Amino acid sequence: MLDCNKPAANRRHSSDVQQARPKPPGSPVTIHLYVDDVDAFSARAVAAGAKVTMPVADLFRGDRHGQLEDPFGHRWSVATHVRDMSTAEMQGAMAANGQPRLQKVLVVLREY
């Protein structure tokens, strides 16, 4: 569409306006991957230009987990399953980490 209300030198085609708008980075999606070695995977990603958004750490559910953002703005959640845990073990781990609300959610889910 052409803006005819302006002098010819100042007219812009609608496609020019669309191209001038900044595009949001990345994606609204976070990709989650289970990998053999989350620490090595994260180190390779950082060496390739990724930014750590959540450092790799052990979680109450038995996974070692971290989050990254690649140079294009895409978010990656990566984990390695370290060990299987019983419900009681997960509840204990949550309580030890000061996560009583998550502990209550797990109890409700188990009863469901």
Image (cartoon, rainbow, N blue to C red):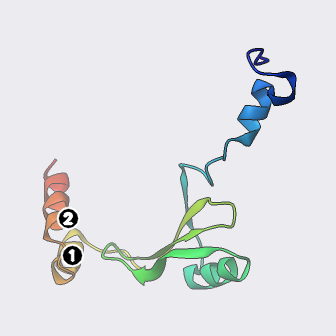
Q: Earlier in the sequence, mark 2 or mark 1?
A: 1
Q: Name the residue that disc number 1 marks.
A: 94
**On the picture, is 85 further left or further right than 57?**
left
Total marks in image: 2
Expressed as whole percent of the image width and height from the top left, the position of residue 54 reads: 46, 75
Left or right: 55 as drawn, with respect to 16: left
Q: In this image, 1 relative to 23: left or right?
A: right
Residue type at numbered disc 1: Met
Classify residue 15 by image quadrant.
top right
The image shows residue 94, relative to residue 23, as above or below, that is below
Q: Are marks 2 and 1 in contact (CB under 8 Å)?
A: yes
Q: Nearer the viewer, residue 77 or 68?
A: 68
Looking at the rendered structure, which numbered label has been put on residue 102? 2
Disc 2 element: helix
The secondary structure type at the circle numbered 1 is: helix
Image x and y of residue 106, in percent: 19, 60
Front residue (pair 77, 8)? 8
User: Relative to 97, is 30 above or below?
Assistant: above
